[in-house]
Image (tube, helix red, strand yellow):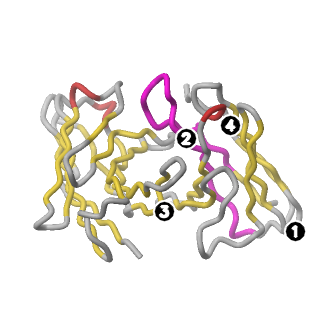
């Protein structure tokens, strides 16, 4: 089964760019049946989808964050990444990387990383 | 304010049954499949139900899901203390062009 592991700085200054990587093991990031994505959860709050990307480069992101989000895939490292620009304290959250299984019906998030807390503070 | 509406909390005694509702609209639940996720305290969410009512391998049949119109329901029978968790519903919203989730329901097993 897939395993996903987030990595990146735990502290980011306001107005700077948050950058996270997710390493996939137990499967290939070049799988046609998977999209790869990011979901975040502010402390004590619910889940918010950030965006999803296919190894081909096709991607889509939450319209509420779209102008600040950049995603990429590195097939040589079996990794995918997200960058969120111009962060504020409101971007403080646990960030999860997820796999999105594409099948005959609606895709769903079948595997989740353990999550990494990113705090935006000066 | 979440696009999908869930009750903030539900509770029941061990061995009993509980249901958690998830209400949406025609742009999300009404025309898309629903998945459910269980988040045990201090851990990442885990897939519990997909395609409205299908269970991934390893999920016991105490957990069930259904959908009717613009609402979905998660059912848990034979409640155990280990079921205490936050539960989230999720689906695609065609109007927003975004994946959306409910605000989460905290299950307490008394």
Residue at left 21%, top 29%? A68
Q: Are marks 2 and 3 on the same chain?
A: yes
Query: CB atoms at circles 3 and 4 under 8 Å apart?
Result: no
Quarter placement of the N terminus of chain A: bottom left
Q: Quadrant of residue A97?
A: bottom left
Left or right: A70, with A35 as reference point? left
Left or right: A17, with B42 as reference point? left
For the record, the magenta segment spans: B81-106
> From the viewer's perspective, is the residue at label 1 or at label 2 nearer?
2
Nearer the N terminus, badge 2 or badge 4? 4
Can you tell which mark lies on residue B15? 1
Asked whether residue A72 is drawn in magenta, I would say: no
- Tell me the SS state at disc 3: loop
- Tell me the SS state at disc 2: strand
Nearer the N terminus, badge 3 or badge 4? 4
Residue A27 vs B101, above or below: the answer is below
Label 4: few (<14), some (14–19) or many (≥20) C-alpha neighbours in 10 Å: many
Label 2: few (<14), some (14–19) or many (≥20) C-alpha neighbours in 10 Å: many
> From the viewer's perspective, is the residue at label 3 or at label 4 nearer?
4
Residue of label 2: B91
Q: CA distance from mark 2 to mark 4?
A: 13 Å
Can you tell which mark lies on residue B6? 4
Can you tell which mark lies on residue B43? 3
Residue B109 pos. (x, y %):
78, 60
Residue A17 vs B64, above or below: the answer is above
Residue at left 72%, top 41%? B72
Residue A69 pos. (x, y %):
22, 34
Nearer the N terminus, badge 3 or badge 1? 1
Q: Are marks 3 and 4 on the same chain?
A: yes
């Amino acid at each position: 089964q897939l395993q996903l592991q987030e990595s990146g700085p735990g502290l980011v200054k306001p107005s700077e760019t948050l950058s996270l990587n997710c390493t996939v093991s137990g499967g290939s990031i070049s799988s046609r049946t998977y999209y790869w994505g990011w979901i975040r959860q502010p402390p004590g709050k619910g889940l918010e989808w950030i965006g999803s990307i296919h190894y081909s480069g096709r991607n889509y992101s939450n319209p509420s964050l779209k102008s600040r989000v950049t995603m990429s895939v590195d097939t040589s490292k079996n990794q995918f990444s997200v960058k969120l620009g111009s962060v504020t304290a409101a971007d403080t959250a646990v960030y999860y990387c997820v796999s999105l299984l594409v099948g005959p019906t609606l895709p769903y998030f079948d595997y989740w990383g353990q999550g990494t807390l990113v705090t935006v503070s000066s | 304010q979440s696009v999908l509406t869930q009750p903030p909390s539900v509770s029941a005694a061990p061995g009993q049954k509980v249901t958690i509702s998830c209400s949406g609209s025609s742009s999300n639940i009404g025309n898309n499949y629903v998945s459910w996720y269980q988040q045990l305290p201090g851990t990442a969410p885990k897939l519990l139900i997909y395609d409205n009512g299908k269970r991934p391998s390893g999920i016991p049949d105490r957990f069930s899901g259904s959908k009717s119109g613009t609402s979905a329901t998660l059912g848990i029978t034979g409640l155990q203390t280990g079921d205490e968790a936050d539960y989230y519903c999720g689906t695609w919203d065609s109007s927003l062009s975004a994946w959306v989730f409910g605000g989460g329901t905290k299950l307490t097993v008394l």
